[in-house]
Image: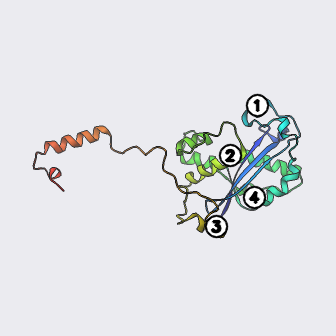
Amino acid sequence: MREIVLDTETTGLDPQTGDRIVEIGAVELFNHLPTGRTYHQYINPQREMPTEAFEVHGLGDEFLRDKPVFEKIATQFLEFIGEATLVIHNAAFDMKFLNAELGWAGLPLIPNSQALDTLAIARKKFPGSPNSLDALCRRFGIDNSSRTLHGALLDSEILAEVYLELIGGRQPDFGLSGAASTPGGDRNAVDWRPRARPQPLPGRISDAETAAHAAFVESLGEDALWKKPG
């Protein structure tokens, strides 16, 4: 099963008021394991960058001036994603921008059914809790210290880790090795071995319960079974 974890950066919140995509980043998964293939593209939005958007992603007019417009990269982007499921955090936002850009370029739109929204998954799994990408990184102990500004490729890489935790861990299909699930079976393609938790899970027995148990055993006297050598 092929999936593409995807993120975009834009000039604002609504393509219908003239906002455009300025960056696309994507990471390929196969059977829930990264293949090492990625897609990354900066895009000239053909408009000035609002200050509010610049403060989010740091992509300014001078930097984007010599980048290709969306129409020039659209075919390559569509070829990369193909018919894979698009794993996106707050999918409605990115999908409306992608389809607006594709529509302006005169290309077929991406069906909304092709997108899987990790924000919706997180809200269902953790109702009432913060479910931003940063909040989920804290919940799962995922290092996002390099995320000082939003960046589409970095956010896609982080989201890939979050997504695999949301669906049950880094190898939810219980595959015995990454190579067995990666196209071509290349064992050197990517290293996605499970890592130890940054913080151990807390014990289930409280200090008070431990003390109460010790007092109970003491009250049984020296002949108590639990005091005899094993």
For the residues carrying marks 4 and 3, which lies nearer the camera in this image? 3
5 with respect to 206 (left or right): right
At a point 76% along the width and 56% down the height, the residue shown is: 111
Question: How far apart are the alpha carbons under marks 2 and 4?
Answer: 18 Å
Which residue position is annotated with label 2? 154
Residue bearing the label numbered 3: 186
Q: Which mark is residue 208?
A: none
Tell me the CA gap for discs 2 and 3: 24 Å
Determine which of the numbered discs, if any, sits on residue 52 in the image. 1
Mark 1 and mark 3 residues within 8 Å of each other at the beta carbon: no
Numbered disc 4: secondary structure: helix
Q: Are marks 4 and 3 in contact (CB under 8 Å)?
A: no
Q: How far is disc 4 from disc 3 in space, using C-alphas?
A: 21 Å
Mark 4 neighbour density, 10 Å: few (under 14) some (14–19) many (20 or more): some
| Three-letter amino acid code at the position of disc 3 | Asp
For mark 1, give the secondary structure. helix
Q: Is residue 177 above or below residue 155?
A: below
Image-quadrant location for residue 31:
bottom right
| Among numbered discs 2 and 4, the one appearing first in the sequence | 4
Instruction: State which tag comes first along the sequence, 2 or 3.
Output: 2
Q: Residues within 10 Å of mark 1 (few under 14, many from 20)?
A: few
In the rendered image, residue 95, in percent from the top left (x then y), is placed at 75, 49
Q: Residues within 10 Å of mark 3 (few under 14, many from 20)?
A: few
Q: Are marks 2 and 3 in contact (CB under 8 Å)?
A: no
Task: Say what amino acid the circle numbered 2 marks.
Answer: Leu
Residue under numbered circle 4: 81
Q: Secondary structure at mark 3?
A: loop
Local crowd at mark 2 within 10 Å, few (<14), some, or many (≥20)? some
Q: Disc 4 vs disc 1: Cβ atoms closer than 8 Å?
A: no
Q: Mark 1 belongs to which amino acid?
A: Glu
Q: Nearer the viewer, mark 1 or mark 3?
A: 3
State the residue in front, 154 or 10. 154
